[in-house]
Amino acid sequence: MISLKSKREIEIMREGGKILAEVLRYLGGYVKPGIRTIDIDEKAAALIKERGAEAAFKGYRGYPANICASVNEEVVHGIPSERELEEGDILSVDIGVKYKNYFVDAARSWPIGTVSPLAEKMIKVAEASLYKAALPHLTAGKRLGDVSSAIQKYVESQGFNVVRDFVGHGIGQSIHEEPQVPNFGRPDRGMKLESGLVLAVEPMVTEGGYEVAILDNGWTVVTCDGKLASHHEDTVVVNEGMPEILTAWEKEI
Ligand code: MF3
Ligand code: CO
């Protein structure tokens, strides 16, 4: 079942989104060489709690941490640990926030110090695949396949690949709702988008092949070829005109 959110529900998710955007903005300035991913987890948990919200991933299907922190060849679902960030790493931080019984979900990827030009480009491509390629298609009357194919086309045109095995999703009173939102597909296919549909759109972009594997910890998704990956995610409301991004600052888009 696909749920469309009322104005009142969107108002709550907007507040949750603002909290999450603030937390991510703060963390973007906090990460640097020498910081451990567990430090980022603790910091995120405190910032979320301070704002009267909850870190939504903890305990979700047994997930052991507050956030996901994925480094280099880790694509998503990296478990925060004692690992220290090093100059040249790329880090993605994915956070779910529960606020007044509604969820929002977003991720950012950041270079740690100076990274290779290719890594820097990949981060920008993942971000632009959402803000430039997908956004114009996230509007009432378009189809889900228009969004998916726009992301894939843009990413591939820039020389990168999109992960197939993990996808975006609807979001609201559950963190994962229907429909699934793949980052690959064909235009003019799939469900018609309607005003009030809220989606977590999350391109996962790889430097090499798109094949991924899951580590023995049961969570961490890595590229099979060991090359870098980048992840960018926002919670977006479909409208008649331009969509509203609940989890970003105007300056980011
Ligand atoms: N943003 C991630 C997703 O939508 C959240 C993973 S939830 C976790 O898949 F708790 F399992 F990490
Ligand atoms: Co998500």
Image: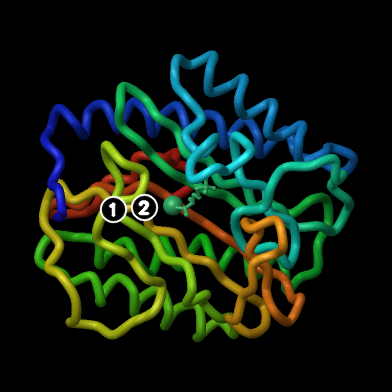
Amino acid type for the residue under numbered disc 2: Ala
Query: Mark on residue 200?
Result: 2
**Residue tagged by mark 1?**
170
Q: Position of residue 113 (x, y in %)?
A: 83, 50
Q: Quick check: 12 left or right of 183?
A: left
Q: Nearer the viewer, residue 104 or 215?
A: 215
Q: Quick check: 28 left or right of 144?
A: right
Q: Secondary structure at mark 1?
A: strand
C-alpha distance separating marks 2 and 1: 6 Å
Q: Position of residue 90 (x, y in %)?
A: 74, 57
Q: Residue at 53% of width from left, 36% of height from top?
A: 59
Amino acid type for the residue under numbered disc 1: Gly
Q: Residues within 10 Å of mark 2 (few under 14, many from 20)?
A: many
Q: Nearer the viewer, residue 36 or 131?
A: 36
Q: Nearer the viewer, residue 119 or 76?
A: 76
Q: Nearer the viewer, residue 62 or 48?
A: 62
Mark 2 touching mark 1, by CB under 8 A? Answer: yes
Name the quadrant containing residue 45. top right
Q: Position of residue 77 (x, y in %)?
A: 60, 54
Q: Secondary structure at mark 2?
A: strand
